[in-house]
Image (spheres, rainbow, N blue to C red):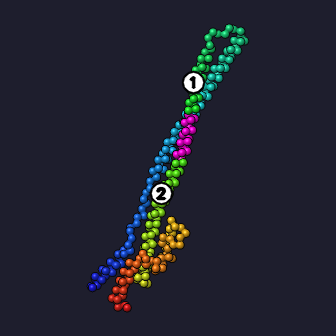
Amino acid sequence: MGIKSALDEVRAALGAPLLARKDVSVETRVIKPTSVMALIAEIREATDAHGGIVESQAAANAHADGLATEIGRLSRGIAGQERALAVSGAPLPADPFPEEAQISRLQRELRVVKARVTVLAESAEANQSKLSELREALRGAWHDFAVATCKEQRERFRAAGLVLRGLYAEQLACLTAFGATQGVPAAAIAIVEDPESRGMEHGLCDHRFLARQAVWEKPAVARYEELSALRAEVEGACGRR
């Protein structure tokens, strides 16, 4: 084998990702808060509607108060005229007092306005019930969105942690296969807990556990065997036994 061919093989061995693993994307798989946003829009619409009902209630009550005040004023006017007739002894007019017709019309209008006040009060109560139901539904939708979002994030976290564990095992395989080599630092400290298995003895990537060859060899055996074989060839070619 020529020198160039041997070097090419060494480069290929060192550069090839021998540990079998799939690429893992840590990009967020967006879960859209469709229900949350729809319910917020409904609540805003219902709140605006309730505000309109309250304004109408206030206007109707003010109208009723105004009518009652006017009826009272006219009634006092009639009472004054009747007292004057009693004092003077003048005969009672054949026709009703003009104020009496006005009072009859105003009383009819007051009854209609009071009926409107009742209808508006019923609408306000129904709208408040609707708002309560929408707010309860929103709290439920927000909880469901939070659970789904955190679950998706944890799935990506765990997938990345498992890849990190494989890479850490591969790192130990390399360090063991090459031996103490100048310029290559020792394996770093790595502790990544598993969010789905808290309290377990070993996390997703724990250097204290992975440091045992029997452990790291399992996922990185192919890498270790190939590098060890290549090292033996290199040492043999260099005259080391």
Main secondary structure of the magenta stretch? helix
- Residue receiving disc 1: 109
Which amino acid lies under the numbered mark 1 shown in the image of this protein? Glu
Residue at image point 35% right, 76% down: 15
Residue 13 x, y percent position in the rendering? 34, 78
The correct choice, above or below, for 164 with respect to 229 in the image is above
Q: Nearer the viewer, mark 2 or mark 1?
A: 2
Residue 157 disc label: none
Q: Is residue 201 left or right of residue 168?
A: right
| Magenta-colored stretch includes residue 191 | no
Residue 55 seen from this side:
no
Q: CA distance from mark 2 to mark 1?
A: 57 Å
Residue 12 x, y percent position in the rendering? 32, 77
Which amino acid lies under the numbered mark 2 shown in the image of this protein? Ala
Quarter of image, res 185: bottom left
| Magenta-colored stretch includes residue 123 | yes
Classify mark 2: helix, strand or loop. helix
Q: Is residue 54 left or right of residue 37?
A: right
Point out the stretch of residues depicted in magenta. 120-135
**Numbered disc total:** 2
Task: Work out which quarter of the rendered image holds the N terminus and state it.
Answer: bottom left
Residue at image point 33% right, 88% down: 237
- Residue receiving disc 2: 148
Residue 143 x, y percent position in the rendering? 52, 54
The correct choice, above or below, for 99 with respect to 41 in the image is above
Badge 1 local density, few (<14 within 10 Å), some, or many (20+)?
Answer: some
Q: Out of 133 and 241, give the one closest to the viewer.
A: 133
